[in-house]
Amino acid sequence: MRTEKQIAEYYENLATDYIGQAQQLRCLASVHLENKADERYWDAMLQQHRPGKYNYLYHGIHHDGNQTSGCSQCLQFRNYLSGHFFICIDSDYRHLRQEPGLDPQHYINQTYTYSWENHYCHAERLQKTLHAKGVTLAERFDFSAFLHEYSSTIYEPLLLFLYMDRNEYRGFGQKKFNEISALQYRAGDLKDSGSPVIERLSIALTTFATPLKSKYNFDFESEKNYYAALGVTEENAYLHFRGHNLYNIVRSLGNSLCKNSGINFEQDVLLDNLAFDTYWEIEKSGQDLKALQ
């Protein structure tokens, strides 16, 4: 088993190697991501704010000898980062938990939404893109309206989850939150811009959360004020909830909507572009990249 000193030396040597790779490839920097799927978002952001060629890394060998990826692997390098080797991670709930040291001064960049998927589900951008691809489709389903209702429905349960997490109360862990909020597409879900989906989500969350609010003296107004100071409101709560859940239901609805239309919803609409500098989460993510020295 390696000592702490040996582990530190291992990651320092890897960081030095990654810097060398960037120089050899004539890249501006090596950038460690959680996995390959993250590259679409982060390269789009880097080309917008720090254009150039980058050496993207998605996985590596953990100090125990196993191949690994993800945020934890990225953060193993936190003491050895620089303008020539930095990391880009999903925020998950780290921003809302106010985890220290995740900033451009430490060469750590984050999404400020739960994950990169949330950015591609930005309501107004999504509906605008759908309209540009097919007016008839946009008239049949309004993603802005759907995501507004989704955000309102997830808002109070999200604050309850964060309140319990912050106070270390048991009974509403991240795994449970993900499970009860995971939605499968059903026939008829396109009705009224997804109202059947919202109804199922509301019932599932209300049934689970109501007894917990009473048990743990949840003060909704107090929590609203606390998290509003961190940028979370009823209107943007959907950007701070688990992106995988959100992305999956949006993609399912879009696939059904675009069936037989000749439009690939995921590639042509959902992943078509980003709404740069139009809401605080993506603005802050971009500002951090520009602040790297």
Image (tube, helix red, strand yellow):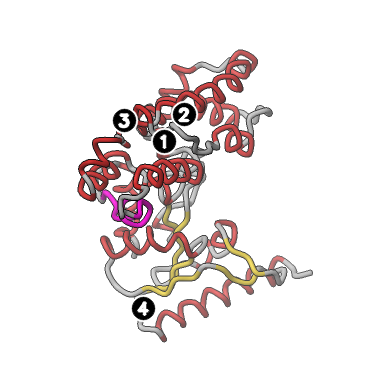
Frontmost of labels 2 and 3 is 3
- Give the amino acid type for the residue marked by disc 1 in the picture: Tyr
Q: Residue furthest right?
A: 1
Q: Residue at x 42, y 46 (%)?
A: 251
Counting from the top left corner in percent of width and height, residue 246 is at 46, 41
Q: Is residue 280 above or below residue 163?
A: below
Q: Secondary structure at mark 2?
A: helix
Q: Earlier in the sequence, mark 2 or mark 4?
A: 4
- Find the residue positioned furthest to the bottom: 24
Measure the alpha-carbon separation of dots 2 and 4: 41 Å
Numbered range of the magenta stretch: 264-275
Question: Where is residue 59 drawn, in percent x and y?
Answer: 56, 68
Residue at (64% x, 31% y) in the render: 168
Q: CA distance from mark 3 to mark 4?
A: 42 Å
Mark 4, mark 1: which one is toward the viewer? 1
Residue annotated with mark 3: 145
Instruction: In this rendered view, identify the residue nearer to me: 65 or 230.
Output: 65
Q: Nearer the viewer, residue 121 or 116?
A: 121
Please identify, in this view, whether the residue under mark 2 or under mark 4 is nearer the observer: 2
Viewer-proximal residue among 218 and 146: 146
Q: Residues within 10 Å of mark 2 (few under 14, many from 20)?
A: many
CB under 8 Å between callouts 2 and 1? yes
Mark 3: few, some, or many residues within 10 Å (few <14, many ≥20)? Answer: some
